[in-house]
Image (spheres, helix red, strand yellow):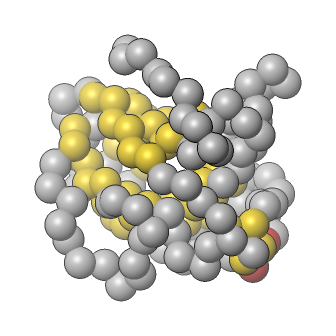
Amino acid sequence: MTNIIKPILRRPLLFLSGLAILTSTSSVLAQTANFEGITLSAYPPATVSVDGRTVGSYALSNIADSDVSGNACTGYADTNPDHILTLQSDFPSLTVTVDSGQDTTLLIQGPNDNTVHCGQDISRRDLDAEITYQGLTAGTYRVWSL
């Protein structure tokens, strides 16, 4: 695993780990992201990180009050997602983590508009957000991290 440098001025750093490899991110998408996109293939395993600073007054509850597991989707962000994640194949396992050193929230919508996952604190001591998927299908995912 790589060393992590804590971002300055609440700049969430988004990590994706599991069975992944970073490839071209030049695909055109229907919704523009605020920061760079991520395109992944399932093999070989890799850890990918991107960064960006999020501000906004759009309530994440406008996207979904709760996710598919019943977790509340709370917080405020920009109307556009921070990142667009494109999975070129199905993933047996994928973890998305925000590393800001502060209390963060994570919302991932996709591969369709009706599928939403919300992540809160990793633990009582680690207030960064994390979502771990098992059996994730190929497709386009919109990621808000704040």
Q: Residue at x 81, y 60 (%)?
A: 74
From what the image shows, is residue 131 above or below residue 58? above
> Left or right of 56: which side holds 71?
right
Q: Quadrant of residue 61?
A: bottom right
Residue at the outermost front position: 9
Q: Nearer the viewer, residue 98 or 119?
A: 98
**Which of the pair 9/99 is nearer the observer?**
9
- The quadrant of the rendering that contains the N terminus is top left
Percent across and percent down for residue 76 are 75, 66
Q: Could one spot residue 117 in this view of the protein?
A: no
The quarter of the picture where the C terminus appears is bottom right
> What residue lies at 31% left-to-right and 54% top-to-bottom?
38
Q: Residue furthest bottom?
A: 30
**Is 142 placed left or right of 129 in the picture?**
left
The quarter of the displayed image where residue 17 is located: top left
Q: 64 or 10, which lies in front?
A: 10
Q: Which residue shows up at 50% across the image and 63% down it?
A: 82
| Residue 71 location (% of width, % of height) | 80, 53
Residue 5 visible in the displayed image? yes
**Can you give x and y, in whole percent of width and height, for residue 12 in the image?**
57, 44
Label count reads: 0
Q: Is residue 63 depicted above or below 100 in this figure?
A: below
In the image, residue 134 sits, relative to residue 111, either above or below, namely above
The percent position of residue 24, horizontal first and vertical second, equals 15, 55
